[in-house]
Image (cartoon, helix red, strand yellow):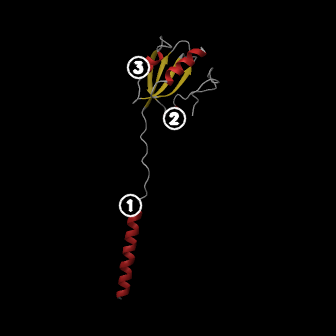
Amino acid sequence: MMKLNRLTVLAILVGAVAGGLLAADTTATPAAKPAVAQETAVFAVPGLDQVATVKALSKALAEKTGIVAAKVDKEKSQYAVTFETAKTNPDEILKALAPVAPAAKLEKVVPAEGKTAAKPDCSQCPSRSGCGSKPE
């Protein structure tokens, strides 16, 4: 009878330890990177139908920290610039655009829409063959 009790106690202990390990879920998962806050500033910019203007605007923004992407809408004469809010802001972007497009004006700022926000559409870009900033 004593052997039966020892086996029972041993079985209970093994079950309790195994159950505790399973319940604790000790698998380590890497912490998710915090999302970087992004917004899109939409500027009214005359002359976006000119290749030289678009190229010069792209070059001006390439030197600016925190710029994620830029997209030209020729029909609306709008230049949408997605940026990291911790690194820059619409006023700083406007200052960077001013030497190229002094008449540029900020129209609105909207939250960026995930990874697809303001990705350039190179098929529409007149300077796609000589552009150094291809989309990912």
Location of residue 136 with respect to 77 vertically, above or below: below
Q: Which of marks 1 and 2 is nearer the N terminus?
A: 1
Q: Which of 85 and 107 is in front in this view?
A: 85
Q: Which of marks 1 and 3 is in front?
A: 3
Q: What residue type is labelled 2?
A: Lys
Location of residue 95 with respect to 6 vertically, above or below: above
Residue picked out by circle 2: 115
Few, some or many residues within 10 Å of mark 1 (<14, 14–19, 20+): few
Q: Which of marks 1 and 3 is nearer the N terminus?
A: 1
Q: Which of marks 2 and 3 is nearer the N terminus?
A: 3
Q: Indicate left or right for 76 with 93 as reference.
A: right
Few, some or many residues within 10 Å of mark 2 (<14, 14–19, 20+): few
Tag 1 near tag 3, CB within 8 Å = no
**Residue 131, how many percent across, how many down?**
60, 24
The kind of secondary structure element at disc 2 is helix
The kind of secondary structure element at disc 3 is helix
**Residue 48, how many percent across, how many down?**
56, 15
**Image quadrant in which you'd find residue 88:** top left
Residue picked out by circle 1: 24
Residue at image coords 56%, 12%:
47
Few, some or many residues within 10 Å of mark 3 (<14, 14–19, 20+): few
